[in-house]
Image: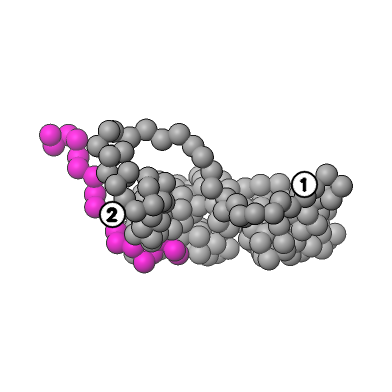
Amino acid sequence: MTVSEEKQCTAFEGSKLVAQGNQGEAREALKKYRALHPEASILVFDDQTGEDFDLEGSPVSGYASGLASEPASEAKPARAGRPKLGVVAREITLLPRHWEWLETQPGGASVALRKLVEAARKQQAPEDRARQATEAAYRFLSVMSAHVPNFEDIARALFRRDWPQFDRSTQSLPLDVREHLRRLALPAQSTLARPEPPDSAEH
């Protein structure tokens, strides 16, 4: 994995943001910070997933220097012929009518399935990004702010995508935590609010 492909992350000491950037940038910033604050308790979060992880304990070489890749002495020689396209064979289960339809498609069942998956991915991409952003924001919120009195209000507004209420509820959070939480949720804010679930007591 190259430096440009490293995950983007954000580090906090308590509610204070102390480092941000890709893994290499954040690691260097934390080294400088720890030189001044050796006893600091640091939490580092993956900006894509919202999960906390051990940045300082993992070597840079495992990502940036390619040590996790296959050693050159054991690398397999390239073979002549048609290059592999990363196709993975796995078992799937369909009804007979589904197989019958797939087998009539140009290119056969595999080509037809790949086209269907790609079309679905494109159609669902905005909703998938919104869901991932919502989940990332919630993971971060759960670690950093599960103790705050209005945690449930914030979480409810987040999952309902009630952004005015989300903004109001998060006003009580420390500035750095609030701004990062809103940044994580931002990809979901172009989507419509979700309707209220029906009250089971009414049925």
Question: Is residue 56 visible in this depiction of the protein?
Answer: no
Q: Residue furthest front?
A: 81
Q: Which is more toward the observer, 94 or 157?
A: 94
* Residue 1, picture quadrant: bottom right
Dot 2: element? loop
Judge left or right: residue 192 versus residue 86: left
Residue 46 lies, in percent from the top left, at 61, 54
Judge left or right: residue 156 versus residue 22: left
Q: Earlier in the sequence, mark 2 or mark 1?
A: 1
Q: Residue at x 46, y 56 (%)?
A: 133
- Can you say whether 175 is above or below 115 in the image? below
Residue 79 lies, in percent from the top left, at 71, 51
* Residue 109, picture quadrant: top left
Say which amino acid is labelled 2.
Arg
Q: Which is more toward the observer, 200 or 49?
A: 49
Say which amino acid is labelled 1.
Lys
Magenta: main secondary structure: loop
In the rendered structure, which segment of residues is drawn in magenta? 186-203
Q: Which is more toward the observer, 114 or 12?
A: 114
